[in-house]
């Protein structure tokens, strides 16, 4: 699924729409260059999931847990940018323990968290070439595994 996003507000709205598809046990991997909108998308996810606390970049704390305000799954927001290794380095975060009860979003997770589950959602955000406002993004959402085989990702483009 490919979506064009024209502003940070639209990126946040995309996160809110994506949250409607998510449930406990879901892993979302976000990739894109610095400033692409990964945290903005995650902020929308947090709003859509109804979690407590402002969703901000966890770059220096590596991971933040946002409990649900309404009985849904908590959001575990991880920034793996500063982590060089694969899953071995991520083990200290106990993501495998949290996965069944939470929605886990990992920024910069490619090559680091795939071993957690065969069922995951890859979200890649690219800046549009030639965009003079520096706000247009092309977002590619790919579902992998049995969990996402029948999912209707077209609802994200609404």
Image (tube, rainbow, N blue to C red):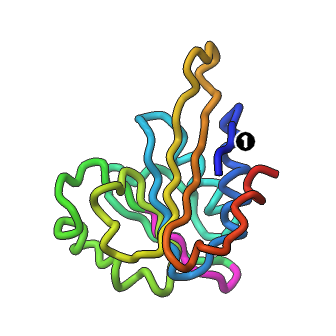
Camera-side residue of 3 and 90: 3
- Residue 142, position in %: x, y? 55, 58
Vertical arrangement, residue 14 with respect to residue 151, above or below: above
Residue occupying the point 71% across, 31% down: 6
Q: How many marks?
A: 1
Q: Secondary structure beneath disc 1? A: helix
Camera-side residue of 67 and 150: 150
Residue carrying label 1: 10
- Residue 95, position in %: x, y? 34, 76
Residue occupying the point 65% across, 82% down: 72
Q: Residues within 10 Å of mark 1 (few under 14, many from 20)?
A: some
Vertical arrangement, residue 123 with respect to residue 63, above or below: above
Residue 79 sits in quarter: bottom left
Residue occupying the point 55% across, 77% down: 74
Camera-side residue of 136 and 98: 136
Q: What is the chief secondary structure element of the magenta stretch? A: loop
Q: Is residue 60 left or right of residue 76?
A: left
Q: Is residue 130 left or right of residue 64?
A: right
Residue occupying the point 63% across, 60% down: 45
Q: Magenta segment, which residues?
A: 70-77
Residue 110 sits in quarter: bottom left
- Residue 60, position in %: x, y? 31, 51
Vertical arrangement, residue 91 with respect to residue 142, above or below: below
């Amino acid at each position: 699924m490919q979506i064009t996003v024209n502003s940070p507000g639209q990126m946040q709205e995309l996160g809110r729409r994506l949250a409607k598809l998510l449930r406990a046990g879901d892993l979302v991997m976000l990739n894109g260059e610095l400033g692409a909108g990964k945290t903005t998308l995650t902020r929308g996810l947090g709003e859509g999931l109804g979690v407590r606390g402002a969703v901000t970049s966890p770059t220096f704390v590596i991971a933040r847990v946002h409990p649900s305000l309404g009985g849904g799954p908590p959001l575990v927001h991880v920034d793996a940018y500063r982590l060089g290794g694969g899953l071995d380095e991520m083990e200290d975060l106990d993501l495998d323990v949290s996965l069944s009860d939470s929605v886990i979003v990992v920024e910069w997770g490619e090559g680091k968290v795939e071993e957690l589950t065969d069922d995951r959602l890859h979200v890649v955000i690219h800046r549009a070439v030639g965009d003079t406002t520096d706000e247009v993004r092309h977002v590619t959402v790919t579902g992998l595994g049995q969990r996402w085989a029948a999912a209707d990702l077209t609802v994200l483009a609404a």
